[in-house]
Amino acid sequence: MCVLTAGQDQPSRKAYSETTRMKPLRDRPQARWLFSQFALPRGLLGSLAGAIMARGNADMARLTLDMLQPEPAERVLEIGFGPGVAIELLAEHVTAGLVAGVDPSQVMLNQAVRRNRQAIVTGRIDLRLGSSDHIPWADGTFDRACSINNVMLWNLRTDVREVRRVLRQAGRLVIAVHKWTLGGESGGLLRLGATFPSLEGVVQALEGAAFRDLDVRRLPTRSGPAVFVVAQAS
Ligand SMILES: C[S@@+](CC[C@H](N)C(=O)[O-])C[C@H]1O[C@@H](n2cnc3c(N)ncnc32)[C@H](O)[C@@H]1O
């Protein structure tokens, strides 16, 4: 901190820059706390983060669905559904099957339930508290699965296997993520004390968990460039 009292000289440009130089984002506790509201939304600020994501990530959800291509009678899972926008879009396509989702945030569960109440009541949507390391459905339950902006929060190698477990053979997985959250591509801006995976790390984890025919696509979205990985369970 730099404090000036009456009569004191202005600090030189050099001294000023030494005392007030911005710390890297990841070293600033306030920034970590703010961004943790997007990683695991809690309380009032978490609700606000949900509203921001609902608006900012909707086109990413649409692109993910274009690649997932669910059939009307299929069973489809979203991991980390956040405010529930992709769940809502999925339910427009999956009219005779099941749309399921898992997310560890109670605040996000509440928002997603509010957004999808009608289809939950009729049993077409099933949203549960949980996370990528424990997906509360039986082996081979789902025909398709997707994750938007949360693969960087997984224990990659083990959680990808958990996703594979709940997918049937030849089931399709789409992982979508903002490019700037991938380590290796940008230095992993929002490291939040964790090591964000690189795209290569995601690809290796998928191949190690018996996913095949990986197709990596890079597309612009409203909230920045995104990377999509489409894979088939073998
Ligand atoms: C950045 S938000 C993305 C939300 C939404 N998918 C979107 O793109 O707008 C990350 C979401 O993943 C959830 N999440 C965090 N860790 C997770 C994990 N290990 N497994 C599943 N979801 C997780 C958070 O609670 C939050 O809802």
Image: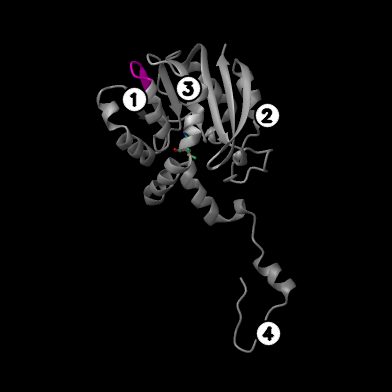
Region rendered in magenta: 94-99
Label 1 close to label 2 by CB (< 8 Å): no
| First reached walking from the N terminus: tag 1 or tag 4 | 4
- Magenta span dominant secondary structure: loop
- The amino acid type, in three-letter code, at marker 1 is Asp
- The amino acid type, in three-letter code, at marker 2 is Glu
The answer to whether the beta carbon of the residue marked 4 is less than 8 Å from any atom of ligand 1 is no
Q: Quadrant of the C terminus?
A: top right
Secondary structure of the residue carrying numbered label 2: helix
Picture quadrant where residue 221 is located = top right
Residue linked to disc 4: 9
Looking at the picture, how far across and down is residue 120, in whole percent? 29, 27
Name the residue rendered at 43%, 43% in the picture. 55
Picture quadrant where residue 191 is located = top right
- The amino acid type, in three-letter code, at marker 4 is Asp
Secondary structure of the residue carrying numbered label 4: loop
Q: Work out whether residue 133 can be spotted.
A: no
